[in-house]
Amino acid sequence: MSASGPNGHGPNGHGGPNGHHGFGRVARKEDARFIRGQGNYVDDIKLPGMLYGAILRSPHAHARLLSVDTAAAEAHPQVRAVITGETLAGLNLAWMPTLSNDVQAVLATDKVRYQGQEVAFVVAETHYAARDALELIDVDYEALPPVVDARTALDDGAPLIRDDVEGRTDNRIFDWEAGDAEQTGRVFDDAEVVIAQDMLYPRVHPAPLETCGIVADMDKVTGKLTVHTTTQAPHAHRTVYALVAGLPEHKIRVVSPDIGGGFGNKVGIYPGYVCAIVGSIVTGRPVKWMEDRSENLMTTSFARDYHMRGEIAATRDGRIRGLRVEVLADHGAFNGTAQPTKFPAGFFHVFTGSYDIEAAHCAVTGVYTNKAPGGVAYACSFRITEAAYLVERMIDLLAAELGTDPAELRLRNLLRAEQFPYSSPTGWEYDSGDYPRTLRTAMDIAGYDELRAEQADRRARAADAREDGPLMGIGISFFTEAVGAGPRKHMDILGLGMADGAELRVHPTGKAVLRISVQTQGQGHETTFAQIVAHELGIPVDDVDVVHGDTDQTPFGLGTYGSRSTPVSGAATAVVARKVRERARIVAGAMLEADPEDLEWTPGRWIVRGDPSSGATMQEIAMAAHGSLELPDGVEGHLDATTVYNPPNLTYPFGAYIAVVDVDPGTGKVTVRRFIAVDDCGVRINPMIVEGQVHGGLADGVGMALMQVMAFDEDGNHLGASFMDYLLPTSMECPSWELGETVTPSPHHPLGAKGVGESATVGSPAAIVNAVVDALHPYGVRHADMPLTPANVWRVIQGRPFRTDLAIQ
Ligand code: MCN
Ligand code: CUM
């Protein structure tokens, strides 16, 4: 294990061309086409005779659908089909299953339940004609009162949203709990200190650069349906299409070409996909549907929207004993959250985070509201984002209450290295970690003590009215992630177990093709997965091609989300490459006229043990395996292998983040001055790509903490349907990130690697909020909800005097 300086050049860090034979800072293979504008995205796909689809959407958040008149649209000379809920009902396709055992309307038949809900689908010769024809459809609605605030969804007399389900009388989706309520109650009853806080993790949207879309092509001659679509999980989509539409699964091909960012937005199946498929079936021609920015922001998925009440119990001297949480989860009009089926609140119950806590309990109630469905997705690790935010805010509240430094309080309560593998009070087994070391590394990079001294000095000056500049705040967050779903006996999606296949072919000249079930949306899999094969076989990274995103060409597996690619598919890749290496040993034995047991592996070669002069390279072995060499009985020749990897456990990456902010009390504007991030994701395959993942996630964190929120007015009108209203962070809002690392290998992953793709999004918002609240300490502020926009920060301190006693405390 080792730590590194601000540039993050860790132990794996060394430059090198792509002739490089394994792990390290290899330049991304895929970038050659991306930076030249030669990517191939769904919207780039143009098939002969292709038609274009457009969706008519509801202007109401809640309304009865009285009639849909499509006659004028159908008469439009360029229109080839108009599909309504009624058309779909005739095909038994008006409703589709969601990822969480609910159903969702593909096109509305009875009511509309959120603004932007899909009502009709027009297929026309051009994109513009399809859009024009939407205006010709006449829909009669009877407006109904909407439920906009989740906190009123269960009130007596609240409008019933899901009256499509017989026997349903209220808007409750589920009540779910984890942990031991009684034991936790006892710990709270005799605790010396108990504090409670309500907090909201607001509704946000992943907003990938490329919106969602599909090109559906039903070939009438072969009966084969090919869909090119923006999906993070091509195989799962294929199976769901087969189950929903009754199409034979072997006659469906799902291709996910280059994807311009997913961030969870491309896990689900959206009504537009089903409509385009139906459009292709009814017209006999390919149909493209690409949503625009507003449609993406308004309707395709969202994240968070968790109203949380946290309670923490501790001793006077700062030993945390218990944590209790109640959550009201706003799931929108259809329960479409993407997560393993058995977990209605995702992995929220990892909420004890990184601390040694005696007892914990959480109770989550999910409710319907008149907002778009989806949920979870947005670099979330299935709700760990909300969980990590909650515990890290609670720790800071406790630190403020006890008058203890928040770093000191964390160091006192973090799990210690000797406690791993660690069983959490809510039933998780953390694989490995050394938390205090990682926090100390971050504090060293930050110069934590000097920062606190600077802050004390500035507060004292402000208290003496010698200075009225910005207030300085320092915020820490320590997170534990749980990624790599996941042992298939515990984790499935709609009955599909969460395991992934890999196939590796080594051609006669020693060039290799790896086929995997996961799918990159920008994470660099074409490089890192080639590096894994190169590392295991000792061949150049450039000699390995990675094939993914095409169900006809890759083995079955559940796809990319929950940072599961490296933990699951990366492990599959290592295992399949080792199988190839073992076959190569047998072939090498025949070549070298030696017992395979007497051979020893040196990178790229099998040699006779102790004699480096007699050996065969991987390339020589590959040629021999395809040649006329006589092989021992039972060996078929060739080196190709396949595997399916079912992970024994999740991997638990973690990290320590420190934000330094300046808050202008006059305007409420927050500036993130510094941000230090020390991530531990076990062994890093490509440290440069890992750092890129962390940079992106940190920017997300700045966005969520300071800017992003999907707001609605009281009628359920969406107030964030463009990037003018839904604010994303840019380089202007981001400081120059200061990264460090520690490396604690996962004991059960064949490479010791843990996932990292969502770590920074999970860990960073709390650091920034903690820093802002810390800055506002002289005003007696203990908590403020995200997003901490200038207006919100300004509002929080109105009416609160600047207290000199707090400033110089
Ligand atoms: N990696 C590594 N060493 C490790 C861990 C990871 O070199 N110890 C590399 C991997 O090999 C991979 C990348 O880092 O190239 C991310 O790996 P991993 O943590 O396994 O995550 P996934 O590949 O499964 O990506 C999913 C994750 C999720 S769920 C979201 S959401 C998110 C994220 O990745 N969406 C992204 N990062 C994103 N980055 C981009 N550019 N675009 C998105 O849509
Ligand atoms: Cu939850 S967003 Mo990612 O898991 O695709």
Image (cartoon, helix red, strand yellow):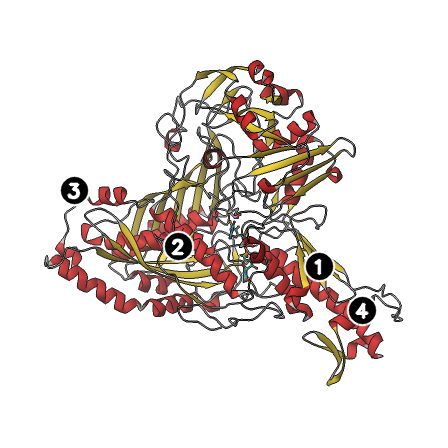
In the shown orientation, is residue 625 left or right of residue 157? right
Query: Which secondary structure lies at badge 3?
Result: loop
Residue 765 % position (x, y): 38, 51
Identify residue for label 1. 513
Q: Spatial distance from mark 1 to mark 2, Cα to Cα?
A: 37 Å
Q: Nearer the viewer, mark 1 or mark 2?
A: 1
Q: Position of residue 165 (x, y in %)?
A: 55, 24
Q: In percent of the image, x 37 and y 56: which residue is there?
A: 321
| Residue 648 horizontal side relative to residue 246, left or right | left
Cα separation, mark 3 vs mark 4, equals 79 Å
Question: Marks 1 and 4, how far apart in space?
Answer: 15 Å
Up-down relation of residue 493 to residue 449 (above or below): above
Q: Residues within 10 Å of mark 3 (few under 14, many from 20)?
A: few
Mark 4 residue crowding within 10 angstroms, few (<14) / some (14–19) / many (20+): some
Label 3 vs 4, first from the N-terminus: 4
Residue 161 visible from this viewpoint: yes
Q: Which dot, 1 or 3, sits closer to the camera?
A: 1
Depth check: 341 or 64 in front? 64
Mark 2–mark 4 Cα distance, whole angstroms, equals 50 Å
> What's the residue type where badge 4 is placed?
Met
Q: Amino acid at mark 3?
A: Gly
Residue 623's tag is 4
Q: Earlier in the sequence, mark 1 or mark 4?
A: 1
What x and y, as percent, mark residue 525? 59, 57
